[in-house]
Amino acid sequence: MTTWLINIEDGDDEGDPAEFVPQLQAGPDLLASANDLVSWSNRTDDVHEPWPTDQNFTPLTDAQVGPHGSQNYLSDEINPNHSSRPSWVVRKLKFPPAPPPPPPVGDGSTIYYCCKLHPEERGKIIITP
């Protein structure tokens, strides 16, 4: 099991959305294995909350994500200069049975997410074997 950190950093230019920047890896996407831990560190002056989406980055509903501590719940809101609570354990997202069916999340090996408070801020976690 490895613990990964994703920094939430200001965009490159004034007015650009914040960016999710994986640490200790090249590229914009985090590569992680099942049972790894992921934590986000907010390096901006705004509050952020990582939130799962479908592969088109449409945020999932509260019912699809479930309550704090559920498998699909990524993090509480993260205040400036703080880290996420709780850390997220890498697993494939699962959806509770409820009509209508949840949006597809690809092949289950990529977790798409955005900031719940700023949906234009987007990231991916690719689950590796």
Image (cartoon, rainbow, N blue to C red):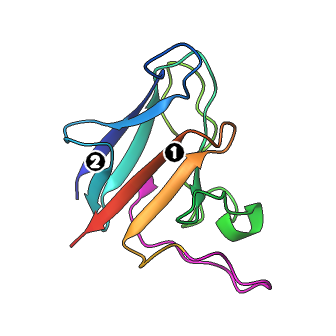
> Between residues 77 and 23, which one lies in front from this camera angle?
23
Residue segment shown in magenta: 85-104
Q: Is residue 97 visible?
A: yes
Q: Main secondary structure of the magenta part?
A: loop
- The residue that label 2 is drawn on is 3
- Choose the circle earlier in sequence order: 1 or 2: 2
Q: Which residue is painted at 41% across and 79% down in the image?
A: 107
Q: Residue furthest right?
A: 99
Please report the residue visible at 57 percent of the width from the left and 65 percent of the height from the top.
72
- Which marked residue is nearer to the observer: mark 1 or mark 2? 1
Q: Look at the image and say whether residue 10 sits in the magenta stretch.
A: no
Give the side of residue 35 with respect to residue 98, left or right.
left
Picture coordinates of residue 9, whole percent (x, y): 44, 24
Q: CA distance from mark 1 to mark 2?
A: 20 Å
Image point (64%, 27%), residue name: 47
- Taking the image as shown, residue 88 lies to the left or right of residue 50, namely left
* Mark number displayed over residue 122: 1
Amino acid bearing label 2: Thr
Identify the amino acid type marked 1: Arg
119 left or right of 113?
Answer: right
Residue 44 rendering spot, x and y as whole percentages? 52, 19
Please state the horizontal and vertical placement of residue 112, each as a whole percent of the image: 49, 58
